[in-house]
Amino acid sequence: MRNVIVKYLFYGSIIFGIWAVLLFSCCHHRNINFSDSEFLHGMSRYGFNVVVSRRLGKRRDVPDSRNTMCLKKQYPKYLPTASVIICFRNEEFNALFRVISSVMDLTPHYILEEIILVDDKSDFDDLKEKLDYHLEVFRGHIKFIRTKKREGLIRAKMIGAALASGDVLVFLDSHCEVNRGWIKPLLFAISKDPTMVVFPVVDNIDHLTLEYIPIPVMRGAFDWTLQFKWDIVFSYEQEGPEGPTTPIRSPSMPGGIFAIHKHYFNEIGQYDNGMYHWGGENLELSLRIWMCGGQLFIIPCSRVGHISRMYFTDHFLMVKSMIYNNLRLVHVWLDEYKEVYFAQNPGVKSVRYGNVSERVELRKRLGCKSFQWYLENVFPELETAVDNA
Ligand SMILES: *[C@@H]1O[C@H](CO)[C@@H](O)[C@H](O)[C@H]1NC(C)=O
Ligand SMILES: *[C@@H]1O[C@H](CO)[C@@H](O)[C@H](O)[C@H]1NC(C)=O
Ligand SMILES: [Mn+2]
């Protein structure tokens, strides 16, 4: 275990190194004062440029990044209603507020059942009375709960889901901004098939400039270390009558931003509540969806920007929980491919992962298919990676 953590911390320190290099390569960012203490302090606290975030404030416009064909699409007026769930811990005040105001501004109110905020025991003072005070303008649209003890992101999401009264749960990260027309394409896909789980194209919001940068459509994948990554979309997938607006099958999802029918979320077993804090839950849910009869799609006409933070505070805790959570996933879902995982990650073979018998039971109860089936039918590119390994 120790070796593994050291390995991950090593990668963490590479990231930190890159960050340090960035700090001194000031020439590309003439507007950033890299020796400003507000900037440095904010960077280490939040992982992005807090000076710019404060300047942008509680609301801004972002460029419409959709393909122009999306603008011509018609959706039914009546769609399932949405409960937007935003979980956070020690988020930067303005970044958090921009998520909420972008949802309020760009979601038709007859579709938006509510916004559910779950504060997972934040420490920062500006997330207390000051936040309550500023949220008053959205009175009647927001349910706000603060956990009594630190629950971790995974359980915080389940707490939010349990409060939802809309038809569809839409999870959003606490440092993103939704774009124009973002919600209807998601809800429309789910209205046609409630076992569809969908997510938008996640545009990049630069962590130094907070500039909104559109990205090409990519699908969610992962490698044998069970790290999420983006992967190319095969061009033939966008050659049908719907062209670049066609929903794309995705082997996995990044996890912070997606929509799922509330009943389906409950039916397939929500999240593994034995998992800690953060990490692995997105992949576990992705496998569970595909292997147990559902489908996971990326919806190109829905766009949400996300600040890719430079590094996490609590790095040690995060790495530890990610390894623990991944092992739970491996022991429940990977069948004989467990051995492939351990061959690639020998250091974690004897690490404890708690009791997964309830999740194994769930898999039986849902009558899920094998991991082999998943590899053959959903993500053949991963198996090829074994042959080459
Ligand atoms: C950058 O910030 C430091 C510390 O606040 C200040 O002394 C310096 O004058 C600033 N530089 C510029 C170019 O604004
Ligand atoms: C694991 O949990 C199940 C029920 O959730 C329980 O019946 C079983 O005894 C537990 N196994 C161990 C080794 O604690
Ligand atoms: Mn994030």
Image (cartoon, helix red, strand yellow):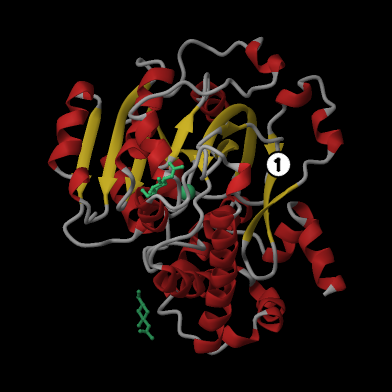
Q: Who is closer to the viewer here, 361 or 228?
A: 228
What percent of the width, then of the height, locates residue 187?
A: 51, 26
The amino acid type of the residue labelled 1 equals Met
What percent of the width, then of the height, locates residue 385?
A: 81, 66
Mark 1: C-beta under 8 Å from nearest atom of ligand 3: no
Say whether residue 101 is visible.
Answer: yes
What percent of the width, then of the height, locates residue 27?
A: 62, 45
Identified at 20% across, 37% down, the residue is 131
Is 251 rendered above or below residue 2?
above
Identified at 70% across, 79% down, the residue is 344
Q: Who is closer to the viewer here, 3 or 240?
A: 3
Which of the 4 image quadrants contains residue 275?
bottom left
Left or right of 36 on screen, residue 307: right
Which of the 4 image quadrants contains residue 95?
top left
Say whether residue 164 is visible.
Answer: no
What percent of the width, then of the height, locates residue 295?
A: 62, 43
Q: Residues within 10 Å of mark 1 (few under 14, many from 20)?
A: some
Which of the 4 image quadrants contains residue 172?
top left
Left or right of 160 on screen, residue 133: left
Q: Judging from the image, what secondary structure is the residue with disc 1 in?
A: loop
Identified at 38% across, 18% down, the residue is 105
Q: Who is closer to the viewer here, 69 or 10?
A: 10
Q: Which quadrant is home to the C terminus?
A: bottom right
Q: Which residue is mark 1?
A: 218
Left or right of 61 on screen, residue 273: left
Is 59 rendered above or below residue 169?
above
